Amino acid sequence: MNNTYSNNTKNIALIGVLGGLTIFLGLTPMGFIPIGPTAATIMHIPVIIGAIMGGPVVGGFVGLIFGLSSLFNAIMKPTIVSFAFLNPLVSVLPRIIIGLGTAYIYSFVKAISKKQTKLLIAIIWVGISLYLGYGIFSAIQQAKTASIIINTVLLSIVLLTMFFSLKKLKEASIDIVISAVAGTLINTLLVLSLIYFLYGEQFVSALGKDVSTVGRTILTIGIINGIPEVIIAVILVTAIVNTLRKKYK
C-alpha cells in the first residue's frame, strides 16, 4: 500500500514537473528550433523522460500536454502550415502515442541482453547513415550544392553521435539512447504521415512547393527536422535520466 502510494505520488509529481516544462517550452521560443519554413522541436523530450521514469501513464499524460500545447500554438501563433495542427489527430494524438510507445519500447529494451541492445542501436544509426549517404549521392548526381552540404553535415553529426552512443556512454545508458531515438522517430513519423494523408497537397502548396512533390517534400522535412531532434534527444534525455536515476536510487 505504501509503495503504491509512493509510486502514485512520484508519478503525479513527474507529470506536474514535466508537464509544466512542456508548457513553458511551448510558450517560449526555447521549444522550437527554426529550420526553413518549419521548426524542429525539443518539446518531445519531457514526454520521453516521463515515459522512461514513470511508464506509459506518465508518458501518455505528458504527451497529452505536449499535444494540447501544439494545438494552442497553432491557434495563437499560426504559421503558414499551422492549419494542419488545428486537427487534434495531427497535433495531439501522435504526442500521446510518443509517451505510450516510448514506455513500452524502454521496457522491451530493458528485458533483452546488452549485446542485442547494442546491435539494435547500431542498426538504427547505420540505417540513418545509409539514407543520408544515398541523399548525398543523389544530390551529387543532380548537382544540388545545398543538398550536398546539408546531407554531409547531417551525416557527420550522425556518425559522431553513433560513436558517442555506442562507445562513450555507459552500457546502462544504451536503453535510454534507444528509447530517446524511438520516441523522437514516433513523433516525426506519425505527425508527418498524418499530414501527408490528411493535408498533403495543401501543406506542400502552403510551403510554395509543387504539389506533385508531396511525398518528397514531406520526407525532406522529416529528415532535416528529425535528425537534429534525434541527436538532441539522445544527448539531453541520457543526461537528465541518468541524473534522475542517481538522485532517486
Image (cartoon, grey):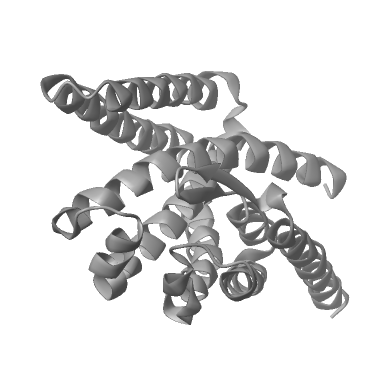
- The residue depicted at 43 percent of the width and 38 percent of the height is 227
Q: Residue furthest front?
A: 208
**Residue 162: horizontal and vertical position, in percent?**
45, 25
In front: 71, or 204? 204
- State the image quarter where residue 130 is shown: top left
Q: Quadrant of residue 50?
A: bottom right
**Res. 44 image quadrant:** bottom right
Image location (x, y in percent) of residue 38: 47, 51
Q: Is residue 241 above or below residue 71?
A: above
Where residue 208 sits in the image (x, y, percent)?
Answer: 31, 54
Taking the image as shown, residue 22 lies to the left or right of residue 179, namely right
Name the quadrant of the N terminus: bottom right
- Looking at the image, which is closer to me, 39 or 164? 39
- The vertical placement of 225 against 137, above or below, is below
The residue under the point 23% across, 66% down is 201
Left or right, 129 with respect to 162, comes to: left
